[in-house]
Image: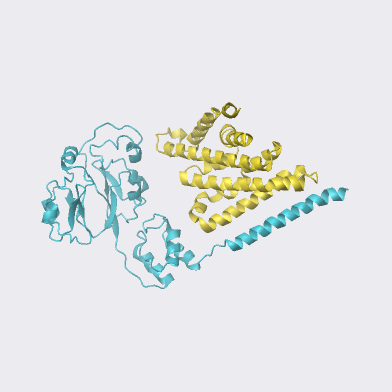
Chain colours: A yellow, B cyan
Amino acid sequence: MKEMLIILFSAILVDNFVLSKFMGICPFLGVSKKMNSALGMSGAVIFVMLMASAMTYPIYKYLLLPNNLQYLNTMAFILIIALFVQLVEIILKKYVKSLYNALGVYLPLITTNCAVLGVTLLNIENEYTFLNSLVNALGAGLGFMLALVLFAGVRERVDNADVPEALKGVPITLIAASIVSVTFMGFAGLVEGIFK
Amino acid sequence: MLIKEILTPALIFIGLGIFAGLLLSICSKVFAVEVNEKVEKIKEVLPGANCGACGFSGCEDYANKLCENSDVKTNLCIPGGNDVSMKISEILGTTFEESEPIVSEVYCNGTNKVTGKFFDYQGFESCSACNLYYSGDGNCSYGCLGLGDCIKVCEYGAISIVDAIATIDHNKCVGCGLCKDVCPKGIIGLHKKAQKVIVKCSNCDMGKFTRSACSVGCIGCKKCEKTCNYDAIHVENNKAHIDYDKCTNCGECAKACPVNCIIS
């Protein structure tokens, strides 16, 4: 239980996938213009991360490992992730058309989102059990959501600020992203302090 | 040995691929989205401005709703007007109803001659930014800030700032309502172009406070209510409201108004 909590909180705060490990920057900058699409995107990413972790674990353990095919794990995992992204796309198109339109190209791009592939590969690298893998995926997804929602809030404020001409648009966004990232460095050592 | 090393991964990946392919094709059948041919046709006819004046979230949504529900009227597209309405009716095979032109109006008359500022705002040129500080810099906290957020969204160049408040040119306005949504004060509204008598004030304060902020603000004196022969104007929440279904554009209330906040 304690181990799970440590994994969960380090994935959300200390080792935040976007702001500390710098994975999944593309949707972080692309879909953070509006709070609603940021929440929708994070929902989709959490779902894909959880399902991909749940699927890749048995595939690695019972299919690749016994046959000495560990070197193929990246390829197999990408296949599984692509499968779930397609599923999410089909379901969103049917039931949440507005969100499907708002996410646009960023939805299929979850396939190549390195945060998702990163979670599945790190699960294997850290030799997590099945449950711990799921907890890690959930933490990574929630961390992604936290980063995206926080940053969407920051960007909504930046839109109403008097930004110097040369910094308008992407430059100020990247500067804001780096400052948000610096704040997350403040969480270093937090998990050790609470749980150990 | 070599064959085994090459064949096993190949077989595993073929198996995974077939599994993924089957799952996806089943799901795409189960969650299939039906595309109506009429929707595509209507989408081509609509202006594609996605302004939302029809009351739906964009042209695509309006086209969908038109096909799904026969109660949805074909004359709701305001920028498109009668032409578009007629074309949609043709596609759907329903009877055509003429649409009435709608224009937007700023319900504020507080020019810099009649009201003032209570602090000097030097920030970003945007009403929504200015509104963050003490509800804006104007003496009247309900009035137009005059920094032109509405001008920026207007695609028809119909809005200009005259004497420090937004003024709408009714010859250019098509009534899309984009300005209505962007105004942080919520003082822009839509009404029928034929409607000439309008209360040009949005101040809901008591008369005494309105008076001290602006000399043309509605003070809720109810003179208009007593003058009206058609029971069309009433003071609610310290401000006169016109019932446009009853109003006959006679303009008696405008003549009676002691502060001249009703125009005709």
Image coordinates of residue B246 in percent, x first then y, are 20, 61
Image coordinates of residue B140 in percent, x first then y, are 23, 39
Q: Residue at x 32, y 32 (%)?
A: B122
Front one among A192 and B64:
A192
Q: Is residue A2 left or right of residue B90?
A: right
Location of residue B70 (image quadrant): bottom left
Q: Quadrant of the C terminus of chain B?
A: bottom left
Image coordinates of residue B103 in percent, x first then y, are 29, 56
- Asked whether residue B231 appears in the rendered view, the answer is yes
Q: Residue at x 34, y 62 (%)?
A: B81
- Asked whether residue B264 appears in the rendered view, the answer is no
Q: Is residue B183 left or right of residue A5?
A: left
Location of residue B247 (image quadrant): bottom left
A139 shown above or below A95: above
Q: How many marks?
A: 0
Q: Residue at x 16, y 42 (%)?
A: B207
Q: Is residue B63 left or right of residue B135?
A: right
Image coordinates of residue A144 in percent, x first then y, are 55, 40
